[in-house]
Amino acid sequence: MRTKRRSTPGRRSAAPGLAEHLRSALWGPAEFIGVPGRLLAKGLSAGGATAAVIIGAAFAGMWGYPRGLATGELGLVVVAALALYLAVLRAGRVLIGLVAVLGACLALLAPDVAAGVALQQRGRVEPARVASVQTAAEHGRSVCSVTEIDAVPAGAEVWRGCAESITVGDTLPVVYDPQGRAPTRGVAAPGELRGAELRLAVLSALFVGGCAVAVVRSFRLETPSGRA
């Protein structure tokens, strides 16, 4: 004769509790009621200020301020500080990771766009002699190393205009920065800079929006004991 196993109430209630804990840890508790206006403003301010510092530092490094600002390293430090701030708020781990990834991409893209703007404003186009041609494995495109002709810095590597037909000894038009802040590049195609600026704007909006969502979903109701 088989005996029926008694169900333990604690085990049944443990599963929903564990699922709720995981959801809260990964995505944030989001225990607010109604429209979280104050939280939304807080998140937008944190994300907007961080994006402004990242982009502002990249452009400042191209115009008279310490050149190190244009490397993107300061942007990565600011993103790390924002991720730590979100962790202190106990925001969802997934959202913290998303904000960190978007912020790192923003910190790497901003110097490239700033360099493009600097070259467009004060860059000079000069011919340069090709010293070597190689194929970049990560991009699958040709990269030309140029030697110094006139004012063009030697040793610069460019891929714009470096076609398969280019050989050592050929001349290639490049644009360089007389102040030496922006890296030497091949002549950009029309609309290329505008596309890069658009990508920077979209990435900034996604970053700020992700930060706002992370802050809003980090809200926890106070328990009767006064602990969140």
Image (cartoon, grey):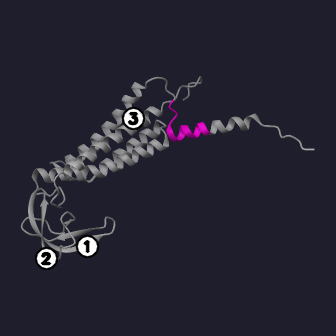
Above or below, 161 against 80 in this view is below
Residue located beneath label 2 in the image: 169
What residue do we see at 36% from left, 45% from top? 79
Is 134 magenta? The answer is: no
Prevailing SS of the magenta stretch: helix
Give the residue furthest to the bottom.
Answer: 168
CB-based contact (under 8 Å), mark 2 and mark 3: no
Residue located beneath label 3 in the image: 212
What residue do we see at 32% from left, 45% from top? 203
Callout count: 3
Residue located beneath label 1 in the image: 134
Q: CA distance from mark 3 to mark 1?
A: 44 Å
Instruction: Judge by depth and name the residue closer to the eye, 87 or 169.
Output: 169
Q: Amino acid at mark 1?
A: Gln
Helix, strand or loop at mark 2: loop
Instruction: Judge by depth and name the residue closer to the eye, 90 or 192.
Output: 192
Q: Which is closer to the viewer, label 3 or label 1?
A: 1
Location of the C terminus (image quadrant): top right
The mark nearer the N terminus, 2 or 1, is 1
Q: Which is closer to the viewer, label 2 or label 3?
A: 2
Q: Which quadrant holds residue 223? A: top right
Q: What are the residue bounds of the magenta stretch?
A: 19-30
Q: CA distance from mark 2 to mark 1?
A: 14 Å
Q: Which quadrant holds residue 15? A: top right
Mark 2: few/some/many CA within 10 Å (<14, 14-19, 20+): few
Is 29 left, or right, of 51 in this rendering? right
Location of the N terminus (image quadrant): top right
The mark nearer the N terminus, 2 or 3, is 2
Find residue 33 and report its horizontal and vertical position in percent.
49, 24
Q: CA distance from mark 2 to mark 3?
A: 54 Å
Find residue 129 and report its horizontal and vertical position in percent.
12, 72
What residue do we see at 18% from left, 53% from top? 116
